[in-house]
């Protein structure tokens, strides 16, 4: 990984080791039109139209910039239904990166989760993980399973200097397996890093210990490697034992220790699709029948073959620290800018993006007025910036209909890789600072349409009172005729 120091220290910024050769035009609407757009979208940033967005920081899933070699690879795709050379190239890439021979394709990460759940989750069983992800939990609970989180308590501290806040509480993991009995544990899932608590990484030491505990109890260990390349960056820069390991050595060691590895290629490798893989064919054989049932034949799994070629090339590139480092370093830069402004943000900087701590942003707003969603609506009004609610709206209600309050009320500002310039990152920080300075205007939200499952995708809310109009008026007073 390159270490480039600037001669003038005040100019020190993250320096990309790539150049941009294709551009896409953006639009920044006037504040009055942004107000109308967010209200028409039911205050749900998922329902905003891309034409109305200046900075799309909703996610880093499937929206990253591909390399020239990925685009070129798409031209050699073999669309044979069976016996495809494209699938052979994907298998070769998985073998190179993870050291595994047994590969099942699926159309994306949540499809892999569906297959895992169908194969192993039965009513009354539990799935243990450091922290849940929305779609993962939904697949497990719909089959009558329960998700139990055993993240170390340090992971729920909004600000600390701990480098691996996604670690498992190993004692709690053992106690939970013993409480339910190994036969009742569908699997233990390691999310590296943890999406809903700020993209915080898990140490190599902790992941290996989790795998060892699973093996001791005869419980399946599953690694969600979707965010692994960010996690590997943090291992290499924060964990002493990883400093002199190659990225490939880390990938191979994890795949050798965990029973099953799966990932979304929308994140790992910056393409499309999903993969389940294992050193042991026993596990892929147990899941194989679900691929043609839910996805497609075993050589494409519902993926479009050109995307598979881009996946293969992207997997090779996920071993290159010059590609891995750009996202975490841009995110760290944004987090530092916000922290210097006094904005409450999750620290240390993790993967995925910067995460605003909305419980401190609007501290008097209760969970059932949805502070993270309200801050997200305010930020769109202020800057045409689309983030993602990662708080109580992203939870699902308990079976009795009561609201399950999130451990952390976060507004995630994802940083898609190789997409934004540093001036755009600084614009984002500037607009967040303005919202922070005018946070007393922000009010709550209430449901007008609430789906029973994954409500954060397509539910609708409205403002309580007229605070959004007041915020737009204050913006116009402060910025004049500026967009």
Image (spheres, grey):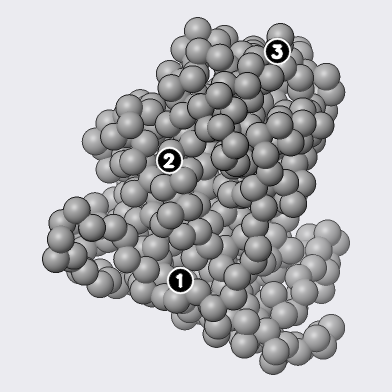
Residue 38 can be seen in this image = no
Against 83, residue 388 (above or below) is above
Q: Please provide percent x and percent y for residue 286.
A: 69, 61
Mark sitting earlier along the chain (3/2): 2
Q: Position of residue 313 (x, y in %)?
A: 55, 80
Is 240 situated left or right of 477 in this image? Answer: left
Q: Are marks 2 and 1 in contact (CB under 8 Å)?
A: no
Label 3 CA crowd tier, 10 Å (few <14, some 14–19, many 20+):
few
Q: Quadrant of residue 277?
A: bottom right
The residue to which callout 1 is attached is 318
x 31%, y 41%: residue:
336
Q: Which mark is residue 466?
A: 3
Task: Please name whichever residue, 430 or 449, is drawn nearer the observer in this view of the structure.
Answer: 430
Q: Earlier in the sequence, mark 3 or mark 1?
A: 1
Residue 370 to residue 314: above or below: above
Residue 414 image position (x, y, % from top left): 52, 47
């Amino acid at each position: 990984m390159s270490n480039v120091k600037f001669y003038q220290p005040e100019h020190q910024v993250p320096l990309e080791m790539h150049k941009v050769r294709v551009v896409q035009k953006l639009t920044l609407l006037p504040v009055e039109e942004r107000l109308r757009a967010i209200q028409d979208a039911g205050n749900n940033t998922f329902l905003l139209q891309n034409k109305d967005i200046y900075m799309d920081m909703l996610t880093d899933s499937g929206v990253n910039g591909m390399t020239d070699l990925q685009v070129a690879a798409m031209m050699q795709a073999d669309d044979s239904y069976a016996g495809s050379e494209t699938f052979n190239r994907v298998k070769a890439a998985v073998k190179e990166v993870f050291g595994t021979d047994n590969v099942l394709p699926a159309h994306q990460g949540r499809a892999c989760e569906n297959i895992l759940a169908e194969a192993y989750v039965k009513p009354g069983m539990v799935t243990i993980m450091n922290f849940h992800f929305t779609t993962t939990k939904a697949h497990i609970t719909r089959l009558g399973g329960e998700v139990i989180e055993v993240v170390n308590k340090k992971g729920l501290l909004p600000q600390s200097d701990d480098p691996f806040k996604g670690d498992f509480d190993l004692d709690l993991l053992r106690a939970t397996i013993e409480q339910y009995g190994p036969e009742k544990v569908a699997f233990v899932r390691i999310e590296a890093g943890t999406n809903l608590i700020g993209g915080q990484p898990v140490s190599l030491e902790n992941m290996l210990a989790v795998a060892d505990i699973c093996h001791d109890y005869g419980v399946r260990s599953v690694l969600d490697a979707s965010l692994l390349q960010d996690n590997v960056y943090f291992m290499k820069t924060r964990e002493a034992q990883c400093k002199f390991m190659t990225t490939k050595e880390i990938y191979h060691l994890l795949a050798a220790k965990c029973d099953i590895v799966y990932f979304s290629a929308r994140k790992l490798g910056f393409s499309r699709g999903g993969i389940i893989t294992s050193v042991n064919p026993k596990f892929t054989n147990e899941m194989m029948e679900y691929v043609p049932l839910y996805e497609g034949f075993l050589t494409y799994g519902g993926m479009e073959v050109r995307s598979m070629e881009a996946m293969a090339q992207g997997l090779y590139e996920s071993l290159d620290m010059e590609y891995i480092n750009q996202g975490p370093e841009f995110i760290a830069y944004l987090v530092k800018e916000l922290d210097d402004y006094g904005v409450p943000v999750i620290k240390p900087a993790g993967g995925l993006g910067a995460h605003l701590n909305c419980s401190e942003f609007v501290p008097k707003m209760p969970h059932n007025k949805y502070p993270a969603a309200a801050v997200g609506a305010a930020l769109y009004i202020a800057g045409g910036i689309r983030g993602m609610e990662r708080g109580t709206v992203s939870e699902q209600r308990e079976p009795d209909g009561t609201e399950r309050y999130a451990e952390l009320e976060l507004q995630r500002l994802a940083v898609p890789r190789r997409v934004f310039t540093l001036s755009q990152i600084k614009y984002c920080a500037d607009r967040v600072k303005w919202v922070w300075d005018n946070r007393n205007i922000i009010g709550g939200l209430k449901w007008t349409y609430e789906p029973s499952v994954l409500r954060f995708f397509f539910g609708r809310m409205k403002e309580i009172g007229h605070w959004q109009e007041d915020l737009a008026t204050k913006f116009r007073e402060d910025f004049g005729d500026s967009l």
